[in-house]
Amino acid sequence: MPHDFLHGRTRGPEPTVMALLATPPGQQREEDLSEGHTGDAFCKEARRMGVGDAQWAVLGSDYLGGFKRLCSWHDLVVVQRPADEDANPIAGFDALMMGSGLPVLVLPTPCAPGATHECIALAWDGSPPATRALRAALPFAIAARQVCLLDGSPAHPHQPAFDPVAFLGRYGVTVVHKHVATGPLDGTQLLSRAHRIHADLLVMGAYGHSPLRERVFGGTTRSVLASARIAVLLHH
């Protein structure tokens, strides 16, 4: 579900999106999914919850192509983990991530309709995906009560480096900087660190290796998506 990103300090950032995803579909919402319906009930519900320009689209057999065209209008993709515990939470995620070209916010199930992200954990390894994820998370970081950088980046003393703390400081975001002496964290360690600081949003780069290599050998992205019980914002 693509959703326009709010730039700058957010005004009650995620509740409208969370409520739309968390609300069980009623009879009208189920009719929206039937062939020939225009999504009027969904759009009306979205407007009632504060979405200024809600639109409905049904993707046909070429769903990935249609999804890519929709993403051209948006800044963020919001999805929710499947409620079915037997479902594969990462099925198709690589196609979603690589095909959209956008950051993807994965919400937990269940998620509170009025929840906001008060404590954010930023996983930082100095990679381009991590940089893009951090920049995409800027509106969330501005609105958060606490932002913690989990820094596992390698040292490059002779190369100019992007400084995430200085970058966020330009926007008035104070960052708690925690060095990870053992280097980049794997998925289990990353989630453990996020849990330790009571984070309700984890921000990270996705697919530091190719999706194929991650599928064969495992990887941080797949491990986090398979196990996370908090919201995760990813960017490739």
Image (tube, grey):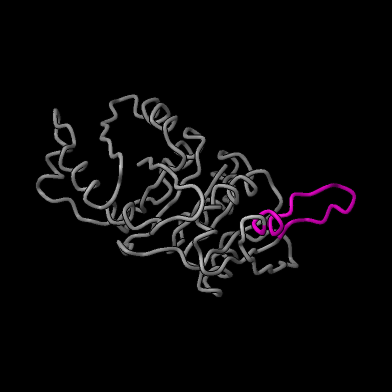
Magenta stretch encompasses residue 12: no
Residue 63 point in image, percent of width and height? 34, 29
Taking the image as shown, residue 192 lies to the left or right of residue 73, namely right
Q: Which residue is nearer to you in this view: 207 or 55?
A: 55
Image vertical order of residue 77 relative to residue 14, above or below? above
Instruction: Answer with left or right where residue 179 lies relative to residue 29.
Output: right
Q: Which residue lies furthest to the right in this view?
A: 158
The magenta segment is 152-169
Residue 141 drawn at (x, y percent) = 54, 59
Image coords of residue 127 (percent x, y): 69, 47
Residue positioned most to the left: 27
Going 28% across and 39% down the picture, which residue do you hit?
A: 54
Quarter of the N terminus within the rendering: top left
Identify the main secondary structure in magenta: loop
User: Which residue corresponds to the image point at 18% horizontal and 36% vertical from the top-left?
Assistant: 39
Residue 168 shown in magenta = yes
Number of marks: 0
Position of residue 130 relative to residue 193, above or below, is: above
Q: Residue at x 65, y 47 (%)?
A: 131
Q: In this view, does 91 lie above or below 204?
A: above
Q: Nearer the viewer, residue 163 or 101?
A: 163
Q: Could you tell me which quadrant the C terminus lies in?
A: top right
**Residue 84's x, y, as percent?**
29, 56
Image side of residue 90 versus residue 210, left or right? left
